[in-house]
Amino acid sequence: MKRIVGHAAWGLVALAGAFFLGGIATGRGEPVNSMWLVLAAVCTYLVGFRFYAKFIAAKVMILDNDRATPAERLRNGIDFEPTNKWIVFGHHFAAIAGPGPLVGPTLAAQFGYLPGTLWIIIGCVIGGAVQDFVILFCSMRRDGKSLGAMAREEIGKVGGLTALLTVLLIMIILLAVIALVVVNALKGSPWGTFTIAATMPIAIFMGLYLRYWRPGKVLECSILGFLLVVLAILGGQWVSESQTLAPIFTLSGMALAVSVIIYGFFASALPVWLLLAPRDYLSTFVKLGVVFMLAIGILLVRPQLELPAFTRFVDGDGPIFAGKIFPFCFITIACGAISGFHSLISSGTTPKLIAKEWHAWPVGYGAMLLEGFVGIMAMIAACVLQPGVYFAVNSPAGIVGATPEAAVATISSWGFPVTVAEMQQLAKDVGESTLFARTGGAPSLALGMAHIFAQSGGGQAILGFWYHFAIMFEALFILTIIDAGTRVGRFMLQDLLGNVYKPLGRTSWLPGVIGASAAIVLAWGYFLVQGVLDPLGGINSLWPLFGIANQLLAAVALCVATTILIKMHRARYMWITCIPLAWLVTVTFSAAWQKIFSPAPRIGFLAQARALEAALASGQIPAAKIAETQHRIFNERLDAVVCGIFLVLVATILIDSIRVWYGILSGRSEARVTESPFVLSRLKAEEV
Amino acid sequence: MNSLKALGKILLGILKELSDEGAYQRHLKSHGREHSPHEWRHFCEHRLRIKYSRPKCC
């Protein structure tokens, strides 16, 4: 009887999911309430978790709770420790949740709410969550080994080295693009700039507090830090209204870019306890708190979506980034549906904390579903804005015109009416001088979030506070990623350079530390400056490059996962990783091909370079802009080369993997399983 | 009431794990040591070195 009721309940959830998905997919003309998106996602994720993920766990991986996990076998009280599954879930979710699922859906909303929403829902269930889950399982069965180590062992030395190079290159592009998001959010904003600048002394205060005054009291210190950050937001309003201080904190894009680059260098070279670790604690708690608040806000307000299901920009002529839904919607959403970076977390800390093999089911698969839900909330936050406002904020001046009048005329001519007065009032409400051409996604996301928070309580009077609170939340964890990423990039570079000259490989050798830090900072700083100078806003070229890189890393992870499944004699189930792998290879290779070779200058890097060359040759460029144009031509070609390198690296791993698969499946080579040997678990129920 | 208590315990556990306080308690227990500023700094050095040798997710 219980079984029948259970089946009936799941049948109802599945039917409800189909109803809500059908509703958002076919509804046109009428305004759609955000709850349709929320319920479609929740029902689909529940069904995916209960049936698809459980099938993978039971039939493909054959998870076994009697088998001791690395957390039990290698227990050392610090890294390896059997931990309650919900605590590991929270820890894992906090580690995988970054700016990607917030910014990607916000940018992809230029196609309308439907394409991005469907991809976040479906892509998560069959792609992103599967990748995270399978890689977590593979690492758990291999003593918590990293993705790079597994690639080297399972595919070969070529695969391992290529994976290392791929991660390093991807990090450079990632750091540049997220730094650009922060720069564009703070450009000409004394309130935002002051708040973010204040988080640095606050973090240093926290570092000193934890090291000398109250060692070990991280939670207490984080509460104190949070209160100081709230004070900094309130102080930011005062600064923005001060005639003396406001000009000091009103910085151009270039000044902010240089500041972020200098900051990145020092932050990555300073002791971690002083700046990086305390800010990481603070940003993690703020991040989880804001995600939770946003979910509550959406449930309380249940806002209408103002953007249509599809916009006219499905034709590929979008102002935020150029390109059609296929493949550009998918690489823009990136981490909201599938993220290669998650494979680094699933093969990092998490497998060392899993107490029982079956805990990998909610942790690996479930946490990614929650991340997909964050993506849905970001999509809702972007779509609650009036379309005219959304495009006025996100469209670069190079596309819509440099003056407010020109911008509103262009955007209104697209069928999204907006007025200068409306934009000025909105800017005044949030304490900004202007909201035109604030590209990068963060300001429009902050506007949408502020709108939802203000409606949940406080009203329009505190819209400015919520807007800057949202900007602070985004910038806080982006800056943490920048200094942690620069530090890791430095380690990777030193690891590689150590093969050429041994002292360079020592992470304590000062000249090596300074040289490698400078090299990494200059590498991402170069792309950041390129984005700042780009009249098309930088996001048009850099975000797709990041999306391609991120999705290619996911392809690498799925190659490793498929290889392991084949070696485990589960070739008949290899479709669970091969379907997302085939999709990712198709999407990323076609996106990369278009970004390099498309004849449309706004899409193809080489076509843009040729168009600029033609303009130079015909004398259309004023003398003062010749050097800048030549520099842009070089940058377009450089972007094409970087895109090409990504393709070559991933094609290398893919071909190497197929060679291994073919060898095993045809019986020419032996399927050698490199799992740790079975040890019976002796963990008692109360220990987990 | 018991469910609320359990939820509170899990939330506190997540916060302690994210703040490294949980790992520090385990470190003290497994090495049979008492909390002291020196011990915390010693723990941090090891913990943070490993933690920040891995990239943060985007």
Image: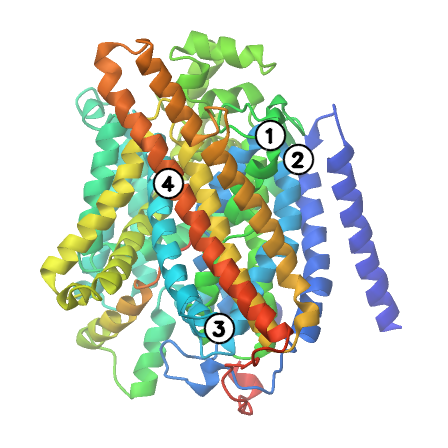
| For discs 1 and 4, the disc positioned in front in the rendered view | 4
The three-letter amino acid code for the residue at tag 3 is: Glu
The three-letter amino acid code for the residue at tag 1 is: Phe
Q: In this view, does A483 lie to the left or right of A152?
A: left
Disc nearer the start of the sequence (2/3) = 2
Q: In this view, does A346 lie to the left or right of A531?
A: right
Tell me whether marks 2 and 3 sit on the same chain.
yes
Q: Mark 3 points at which residue?
A: A154
Q: Residue at x 61, y 14 (%)?
A: A415
The three-letter amino acid code for the residue at tag 2 is: Leu
**Quadrant, the N terminus of chain A:** bottom right
Tell me whether marks 2 and 4 sit on the same chain.
yes
| For discs 4 and 3, the disc positioned in front in the rendered view | 4
Tell me whether marks 1 and 4 sit on the same chain.
yes
Q: Provide the chain ID for the residue under circle 2.
A: A
Residue A211 picture location, percent across and down:
19, 65
Q: Provide the chain ID for the residue under circle 3.
A: A
| For discs 2 and 4, the disc positioned in front in the rendered view | 4
Q: Name the residue under label 1.
A: A111
Tally the marks.
4
How far separated are the C-alphas under marks 2 and 4?
33 Å
Q: Name the residue under label 2.
A: A114
The three-letter amino acid code for the residue at tag 4 is: Val
